[in-house]
Image (cartoon, grey):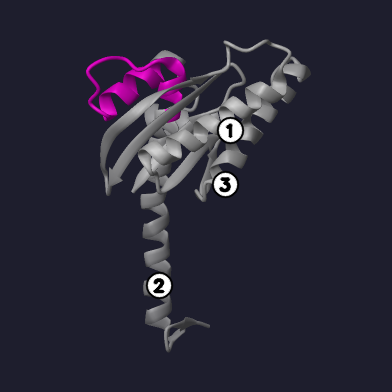
């Protein structure tokens, strides 16, 4: 399964693409979509750059699924609203490009990648580098995006195990008849 991770931001949105084959993870690509070349007050143009950038990633890397960070509340409500709009543009682009979208909090991603939900950005960068056997340290936004893709890969394995356990339980109790769950 190829997973596209997105770390949304109005100025810089990180992306990371990972191939997951069971527990094996393989780095495909990472980087950022930047809107810093546009005027700060031109929100519609910035959102369009994010939307179009996600579409280009879909075309270039052909992911099977996407994982995006859930926005946390900042001290500044205006910043939170702007970040929410950037995230909305990214989610809309993912859905418009027919990708299933999973959402994870920063704490969930840090827990999955670094083993603690309170990991610092540098810890996430180092663990992403190690897990994907990268020759160098990824940038902070790209590392978070790759971390989201890794988190989704781990979650997909757990979900498959839970579904299989449920199927086995239903077969053992006789609840499975003619291929339908009763």
Magenta span includes 30: no
State which quadrant residue 174 falls in.
bottom left
Give the magenta part as a residue range: 123-145
**Horizontal side of residue 91 vs 5, given as left or right:** right
Please determine whether, in this image, residue 60 is positioned above or below residue 78.
below
Image coords of residue 92 (percent x, y):
62, 41
Image coords of residue 127 (percent x, y):
33, 23
- Label 3 or label 1, whichever lies nearer to me, is 1
How many neighbours does mark 1 have within 10 angstroms: few (below 14), some (14-19), or many (20 or more)?
many
Q: Judging from the image, what secondary structure is the residue with disc 3 in?
A: helix
The residue lying at 28 percent from left, 29 percent from top is 131
How many neighbours does mark 3 have within 10 angstroms: few (below 14), some (14-19), or many (20 or more)?
few
What predominant SS class does the magenta segment belong to? helix
**Horizontal side of residue 170 vs 103, given as left or right:** left
How many neighbours does mark 2 have within 10 angstroms: few (below 14), some (14-19), or many (20 or more)?
some
Counting residues from the N terminus, which is met first, the one under dot 1 or under dot 2?
A: 1
Q: Judging from the image, what secondary structure is the residue with disc 2 in?
A: helix
Image coords of residue 102 (percent x, y):
52, 45
- Label 2 or label 3, whichever lies nearer to me, is 3
> Total label count?
3
* Residue 115 visible in the current orientation: no
State the mark number for residue 167: 2
Residues tagged 3 and 1 counted as in contact (Cβ below 8 A): no
Question: Can you identify the residue that label 1 sits on?
Answer: 51
Question: Can you identify the residue that label 3 sits on?
Answer: 95
Please determine whether, in this image, residue 95 is positioned above or below residue 28.
below
Residues tagged 1 and 2 counted as in contact (Cβ below 8 A): no
């Amino acid at each position: 399964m190829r997973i596209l991770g997105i770390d949304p931001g109005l100025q810089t949105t990180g992306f990371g693409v990972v191939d997951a084959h069971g527990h094996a993870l393989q780095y495909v690509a990472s980087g950022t979509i930047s809107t810093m070349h546009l005027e700060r007050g031109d929100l519609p143009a910035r959102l369009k750059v994010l939307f179009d950038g996600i579409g280009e990633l879909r075309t270039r890397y052909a992911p099977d699924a996407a994982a995006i960070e859930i926005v946390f509340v900042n001290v500044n409500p205006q910043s939170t609203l702007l970040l929410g709009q950037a995230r909305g543009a990214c989610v809309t682009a993912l859905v418009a490009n027919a990708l299933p979208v999973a959402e994870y909090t920063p704490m969930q991603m840090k827990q999955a990648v670094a083993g603690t939900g309170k990991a610092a950005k540098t810890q996430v960068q180092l663990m992403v580098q190690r897990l994907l056997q990268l020759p160098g340290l990824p940038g902070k936004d790209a590392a978070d995006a790759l971390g989201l893709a890794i988190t989704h890969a781990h979650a997909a394995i757990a979900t498959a195990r839970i579904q299989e356990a449920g199927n086995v339980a239903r077969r053992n109790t006789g609840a499975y008849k003619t291929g339908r769950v009763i």
